[in-house]
Amino acid sequence: MDFTKLSGAEKAAVLLLCLGEEATAKVFEQLTDSEVRMISRSMMTIDYVPSDVAKQVFAAYNKAQQGISGLFVKGSEFTKKAISATGNQQRFKALMEQVASGTEARPLETISMMEPRMVASILEHEHPQTLALILSTQRPEHTGKILSHFSEELKSEVMYRIAKIEKVSPEVITQIEEALQREIGVVVNKEQQQVGGIDKVVEILTRMEKGVDRNILIRMEETDPDLAEAIRRKMFTFDDLTGVDDAALQKILKEINTDTLTMSLKTASEELKKKIFNNISKRAGEMIQEDLDIMGPTKLSDVEAMQQVIIKTALRLEDEGAIILPGRGGRDVLV
């Protein structure tokens, strides 16, 4: 370790490693998340601090520290404890996820810190597949804000392509990074990454403005109905009915016949059964329970098919404006 070649963040990391976890925690409380990330990543690469480097770093602080002969430290463990000691567990989790992505910079990290409108202006002329690869590496809420500046057609095309992504090789990421380097100077993480897929699309859609999720799925359905359906299934599941208010649930159940409802409840949780029984007549509930008690082995696929009938009914009623489903597409969760 050569003091003259250390960056500012690396010098700060050495200083804090020497000062200890308690002092570091107090310093972290006064820094921005970006500063904590930079210093933490430097810490995690350090296993030993040579005495001469420690002396030079401490020269401006305390003469008593100049005689230090060097420190052997567990940088990774130290960093976790120091960040955790700040007392904010939500911040700790978020920072550690970002720091643990690797001691090298995260791919496309610069974009993650840029204003969505600026990112959109840089990327708007890129091919939809390139856009999908880039945006699938970002936080879902950030991707949603960037997409809000694109046309409806481009939004749908990009989301469709994100859903089809599984893993991206380092070579592909490198090509993208090189193409963007002049504008934003991004550094690539060399490990292959899980960046897209249906789960990623669901995360993004649920953070977008009201109605945007529906428009994107409608357009996506024209290209790939099965994919659009798979995304819908993950956006709102049968178990999510427990969070629907009673008035909305009653509107849904009015359109479902008894046989379908009975079959759908075969694998339902007791909480959901209770919720549904509280919103139908007592006699209807007793009959359904009796049928469930005597129902023999049933194919899971048949049960799921009936559950999908109810889910589709709920989504249709929401599209028609008859009900509001909690927590979807930027909507407020009902309590």
Image: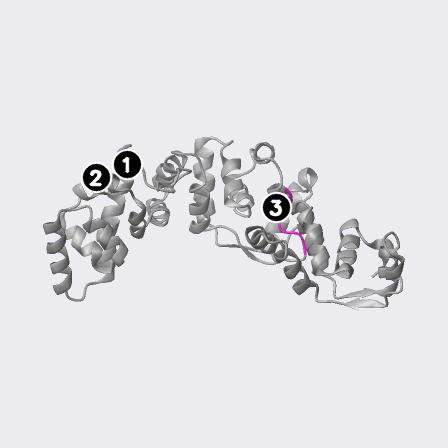
Q: Which residue is mark 2?
A: 251
Mark 1: few/some/many CA within 10 Å (<14, 14-19, 20+): some
Q: Is residue 150 left or right of residue 122?
A: left
Q: Position of residue 251 (x, y in %)?
A: 21, 39
Foreground of the two, 257 or 281: 281
Q: Position of residue 208 (x, y in %)?
A: 45, 37
Tell which circle, 2 or 3, labels the residue nearer the N-terminal end.
Answer: 3
Residue drawn at the location 88% of the way across and 61% of the way down: 64
Q: Which residue is mark 3?
A: 176
Front disc: 1 or 3: 1
Quarter the C terminus occupies: top left
**Mark 3 element type:** helix
Asked if labels 1 and 2 touch by Cβ distance under 8 angstroms, the answer is yes
Q: Which residues are magenta?
A: 104-110
Foreground of the two, 222 or 325: 325
Q: Position of residue 323 (x, y in %)?
A: 28, 36
Foreground of the two, 143 or 171: 143
State which quadrant residue 296 falls in.
bottom left
Q: Which residue is mark 1?
A: 323
| Mark 2 to mark 3 CA distance (whole Å) | 49 Å
Q: Is 92 contained in the magenta span? A: no
Residue drawn at the location 49% of the way across and 33% of the way down: 148
Mark 3: few/some/many CA within 10 Å (<14, 14-19, 20+): some
Quarter the N terminus occupies: bottom right
Q: Is residue 29 left or right of residue 276?
A: right
Tell which circle, 1 or 3, labels the residue nearer the N-terminal end.
Answer: 3
Tell which circle, 2 or 1, labels the residue nearer the N-terminal end.
Answer: 2
Can residue 187 be seen in this snapshot? Answer: no
